[in-house]
Image (cartoon, helix red, strand yellow):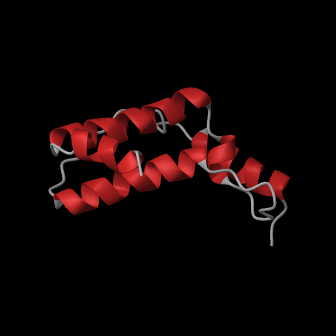
């Protein structure tokens, strides 16, 4: 298994490849339930930190601005699917 600093170097190298910051357009059609699942996965991946985790977390290496973009993406998906209100109510549980 690679050490955390090795994994960090690999991802920093991948993210520095020319064109990685280029904007792309993705058009997908998925069921609302998958929009809800995907938004929850993004939310959970960004917010949950396990200090005992021995495996490096890639999201720990991501700049804060990029994480904000992921949160915005999840929010936009919920809005387009008409699930914003439902998601807010689910978050109260």
Q: Indicate the position of residue 2 as horizontal and vertical percent values.
A: 81, 66
Q: Indicate the position of residue 69 as horizontal and vertical percent values.
A: 44, 32
Residue at the spot x=16%, y=61% of the render? 31
Q: Which of the two residues, 7 or 32, is positioned nearer the viewer here? A: 32
Q: Quadrant of the N terminus?
A: bottom right
Q: Is residue 38 visible?
A: yes
Q: Is residue 1 left or right of residue 61?
A: right
The quadrant where residue 46 appears: top right
Q: Is residue 91 above or below residue 57?
A: above
Residue at the extreme bottom of the image, as rendered: 1
- The number of numbered discs placed on residues in the rendered structure image is 0
Q: Is residue 89 left or right of residue 50?
A: left
Q: Is residue 25 visible?
A: no
Residue at the spot x=32%, y=37% of the render? 75
Q: Is residue 32 above or below residue 88?
A: below
The quadrant where residue 15 appears: top right
Q: Is residue 29 left or right of residue 60?
A: left
């Amino acid at each position: 298994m690679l050490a955390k600093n090795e994994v960090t170097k690999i991802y920093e190298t991948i993210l520095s490849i020319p064109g990685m910051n280029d904007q792309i357009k993705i058009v997908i059609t998925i069921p609302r339930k998958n929009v809800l699942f995907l938004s929850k996965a993004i939310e959970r991946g960004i917010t949950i930190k396990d200090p005992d985790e021995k495996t490096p977390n890639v999201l720990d290496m991501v700049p804060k601005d990029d994480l904000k973009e992921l949160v915005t993406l999840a929010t936009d998906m919920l809005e387009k699917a008409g699930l914003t209100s439902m998601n807010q109510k689910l978050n109260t549980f």
